[in-house]
Image: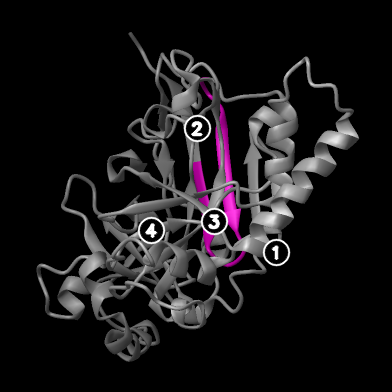
Amino acid sequence: MNPPAPSALFTGPFALGTLSAPDETPFPALITPDGRALDLRSALNAQTLTIRTLLEDLAEALPLLHSLASQPAGAWQALHTLQVHAPVEPRQIFQSGANYRQHVIDLEVAHRSPDDPRTLEEARAEVAEIMDRRAAEDLPYVFIGLPSAITGPYDDVVLPAWAHKPDWELELAAVIGRPAHRVPVEEALEYVAGYTIANDLTDRASVFRRDMPAIGTDWLRSKNAPGFTPLGPWIVPAESVVDPSDLRVTLKLNGDTMQDESTKDMLFGVARLVSYISQTAHLLPGDLILTGSPAGNGIHWGRLLHDGDVMEGSITGLGLQRTRCVEEKA
């Protein structure tokens, strides 16, 4: 599928992405809001440059990137003539689950046992109390995703034949720019290079193991099929995102709005997630932290993904991704 019109791109003077001409090698690109793209390998005289390696020195490169974006002359290409790929190839993907208060309440109620003696109101109140306690105790829930699940922001998403309840989960993704280990919350945002959009598709039928329920969740099976994480289209530098805790996350399915929530509903903001993850893991440049999905998933609506469905995901100032679902052929 094609990129959106320039007016739907992003806010700020520029963004970073990975593009390619037809049948040619992808290249790291500087993209402007008016729909121009510049190959940064030539502009920075670095033929082996990728977005991931650029992120390692992004702080030093930012003044030059600002200068390049402000120059109308140069080897600019029209964005609409190029293919848009996932903006970065991460080495690690950390995914925050149960991080939107309303979303968790909806999911818990949707999965409630038919034998549950509580009324609907009682069940919602009990889950809300648990969410508030989690936030107060500072215990995010984070699991690991596979880079091989990433696909481009306009690529078709293949729904595997075994995925009986495929669902959408649009999320704000923070992109790490500096190695981070055991960083305090107060310094955590200094390690975020920018932000992008991720759709963390989930097969609800595969989340819980039926053969041995005590094992718990099966994130490998339910979330990591090839193409189950459409990413991008761009990385908008952190300096252009005024407040990541006040962005609108919106997903439309075939034109109908299904998710439309502010990141204010997150239990744990970006800084707390970065700090929490870094207490265990070494975060590396280009790594992704998916911050969870708001209310309005398919399991809530009783309407899951099918062949031919088109998802449009947008987050304030970060652009728009548009993906079509294609049923796997035997």
Find out whether residue 196 is within the magenta segment. no
Are discs 1 and 3 less than 8 Å apart at CB? no
Q: N-terminal of the two: label 1 or label 3? A: 3
Structure colour scheme: one colour
Q: Is residue 168 above or below residue 314?
A: above
Is residue 10 visible in the rendered image? The answer is no
98 left or right of 275 in image? right
Q: Secondary structure at mark 4?
A: strand
Residue type indicated by callout 3: Pro
Q: Using residue 18 as the reference point, say whether residue 203 is left or right of it.
A: right
Position of residue 139 relative to residue 65, above or below, is: above
Mark 1 belongs to which amino acid? Lys
Q: Of label 4 and label 2, which has the lower sequence position?
A: 2
Q: Nearer the viewer, residue 306 or 243?
A: 243
Mark 3 or mark 2, whichever is nearer to me: 3
- Viewer-side residue, 148 vs 325: 148
Which residue does the numbered mark 3 point to in the structure image? 140
Q: CA distance from mark 4 to mark 1?
A: 20 Å
Quarter occupied by residue 233: bottom left
Asked which secondary structure carries label 1, the reply is helix
Can I make out residue 70 in this image? Answer: yes
Q: Disc number at residue 264?
A: 1
Q: Residue at x 52, y 63 (%)?
A: 9
Give amino acid for label 4. Answer: Leu
Residue range highlighted in magenta: 307-322
What residue is pinned by disc 4? Answer: 288
Question: Mark 4 or 3 closer to N-term?
Answer: 3
Of mark 2 and mark 1, the one earlier in the sequence is 2
Spatial separation of the CA atoms under disc 4 and disc 2:
18 Å
Residue placed under numbered mark 2 in the picture: 202
Q: CA distance from mark 4 to mark 3?
A: 16 Å
Say which amino acid is labelled 2. Thr
